[in-house]
Image (tube, rainbow, N blue to C red):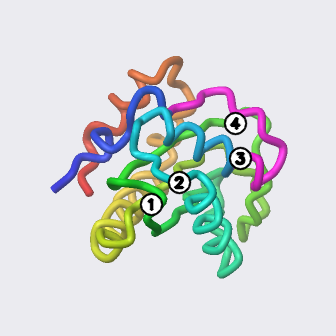
Amino acid sequence: MAIIADLLDEGSIDLSLTARNKDDAIERMVDLIDVSGALIDRDVLIKAVRAREEVGTTGLGDGIAIPHGKCDGVGRPTLAFARSDKGVDWGAPDGSLANLIFLIAVPEAAAGNEHLRILASLARSLVKADFRSRLMATSNPQEVREVLAGISA
């Protein structure tokens, strides 16, 4: 069983996301995944994440978005995390802007259970206000990984 923090490289964390819209945020987060070394094809991953957004928003509400893509644009399951102080409109049902954004990228071959376990684990933690507050209060990537260290996928 994977630990969420192990899927997130410190270089794949942006604590001052400046993207003004969902598309720009997705592109920035794919660039963060590239830092981890997991990216094989940037365009393929961006296309997969955008295609998933067309099915329905991954903006969950409460300032959270968990965009995800299953494709061969990555070589292994990986995460990127971005925090936006101003927020990004992710089309959340409650109308809130996304301040905490996790991008999940999983190779097609590992897409089934792995993808769903990661998504479910993150969502279970992010519904807790104290957990969100702790992520908002982090000042560096190491602290983000420490907050996520207790979450198993």
Q: Residue furthest right?
A: 20
Mark 3 nearby-residue class (10 Å; few <14, some 14–19, many ≥20): many
User: Element at badge 1?
Assistant: helix
Mark 2 nearby-residue class (10 Å; few <14, some 14–19, many ≥20): some
Taking depth in this image into account, of 65 and 78 the one nearest to the observer is: 78
> Residue 125 at x, y = what percent?
40, 52
User: Which residue is label 2 attached to?
Assistant: 41
- Amino acid type of the residue that numbered disc 3 sits on in the rendered structure: Ala
Nearer the viewer's eye, disc 1 or disc 4? 4
User: Which residue is label 3 attached to?
Assistant: 25
Q: Is 17 on the left or on the right of 8, as rendered?
A: right
> Residue 59 at x, y = what percent?
65, 63
> Residue 132 at x, y = what percent?
52, 42
User: Which residue is label 4 attached to?
Assistant: 84
Q: Residue furthest top?
A: 139
- At x 32%, y 54%, the residue is 76
User: Element at badge 2?
Assistant: loop
- Lower sequence index among marks 3 and 2: 3
- Lower sequence index among marks 4 and 2: 2
The answer to whether the residue labelled 4 contacts the one labelled 3, judged by CB atoms less than 8 Å apart, is yes
Q: CA distance from mark 4 to mark 3?
A: 10 Å
Q: Residue furthest bottom?
A: 55
- Amino acid type of the residue that numbered disc 1 sits on in the rendered structure: Ala
Residue 66 on the magenta segment: no
Which range of residues does the magenta coloring cover?
A: 13-25
Nearer the viewer's eye, disc 3 or disc 2? 2
- Lower sequence index among marks 4 and 3: 3
User: Element at badge 3?
Assistant: helix
User: Element at badge 4?
Assistant: strand
User: Which residue is label 1 attached to?
Assistant: 123
Q: CA distance from mark 1 to mark 2?
A: 27 Å
